[in-house]
Image (spheres, rainbow, N blue to C red):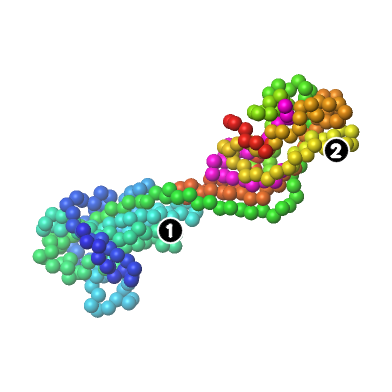
Amino acid sequence: MALIPHNLDDEDEVAVETRNVSPSHFLFKIESFSLLSKSGIVNYESTEFSAGDYKWKLIFYPNGEDQESKNEDDDNIAVNLAVADTSSLPPRWEVNAVFSIFLYNQKSDNFLSMRGRTRRFHAVKLEWGFPKFISKKSLIDPSNGYLVNDDCVFGAEVFVIKSQGVVECLSMYEVGKAIHRSWRISQFSQLEVKWVSEEFLVGDHTKMEVYPRGNGAEEDRSISIFLSLVDSSLTPFHKVKANYTVKIKHQYNGEDCIESDTDWFTSLGASLGFPEFMSISDMNDPGNGYLFEDCCILEVEMFVQAVSHVRVNGKLILKDHPLKWKEKKKYYEKS
């Protein structure tokens, strides 16, 4: 196989080789070739064929692709590949492919193959190929074996390059009005391992968790409170940066217990928050005013600072925010 310059433009290179194996995707036979250029047919579009989950067609230009600027000495035949049936493709579609165009040598029983660079097909550029695939002089020369009994055979192979790339988009948000949520947790002393809030929206789905007897290293020592991102439609690639303030209200007009932080949350990541939000003894002390008739008031205030959206294989993993949450402290809870 030889890699040779080909006059498509100054930067293009074409690999030209001969091989014995037939093209795997399409063969196209032209009978009575000499009548084709005389018939007034400017180009001929082949039937559709499938390759790499897409529909394709060959476009054959017997007198060259650019008729208006054609020189008298320019007798080249152009053969292009085009995407067919684009109506079934999604908006802003694109297909990257490497393709080869073939010409059968009936004398030596092998194929001339021409392959160019990887090409990007999209709505604005449906067609790529070789404006100077072969000259008519070379095609009709009997010694070359490409035209026998006025018949010739072309072919095509198309290999689609599946996109495996990851594209990340970081969206920043101005600090606006914070989201407030409040809960009355009754029979606090009767809670067992943890209390879990309903999911609430702060960009995505979120919830809160309160461990009345502590969590992890703070078990039997502190009240632990955490927040987590819980939207099942999110992926591990999706991240949300949020500022949050958690408080347990003093119910006698005294000073509330407040903790604040800023963190990056992920749907499959650790819950974040405050494992030592308040000591159990301070919580249970009637003089502190956090419990009244075995009920406490929990509040959270949040606002989103940034959201990272991710595309994998060319698909946007997640829609725009809203975010769903639940509650937890500056601590990574084990799953």
Magenta stretch encompasses residue 72 = no
* Residue 179 appearing in the image: yes
Q: Position of residue 221 (x, y in %)?
A: 72, 27
Residue type, mark 2 in image: Glu
Say which quarter of the image contains residue 113.
bottom left
- The crowding category of the residue bearing disc 2, from other C-alpha atoms within 10 Å (few below 14, some 14 to 19, many at least 20), is few
Which element type, helix, strand or loop, lies under badge 2? loop
Please give the residue where the numbered disc 2 appears in the rendered image. Answer: 255
The quarter of the rendered structure image containing the N terminus is bottom left
Label 2–label 1 contact, CB within 8 A: no
Q: Which residue is most to the bottom?
A: 72
Point out which mark residue 122 bears: 1
Q: Residue 44, position in %: x, y?
A: 29, 62
Q: Quadrant of the C terminus?
A: top right
Q: Farthest residue to the right: give it.
A: 252
Q: Amino acid at mark 1?
A: His
Q: Residue at x 15, y 55 (%)?
A: 110
Taking the spot 62% from the left edge, 42% from the top edge, the residue there is 265
Whether the magenta-drawn stretch holds residue 234 is answered as yes
x and y, in percent, of residue 120 in the image: 40, 58
Q: Which residue is drawn at the image coordinates 64% and 28% (left, top)?
A: 216
Vertical position of residue 145 compared to residue 290: above or below: below
Q: Earlier in the sequence, mark 2 or mark 1?
A: 1
Is 131 situated left or right of 106 in this image?
right
When asked about the image quadrant of residue 294, the answer is top right
Circle 1: element type: strand
* Residue 271 position within the rendered picture, expressed as x and y whole percent measured from the top left: 63, 36
Q: Which residues are magenta?
A: 221-244
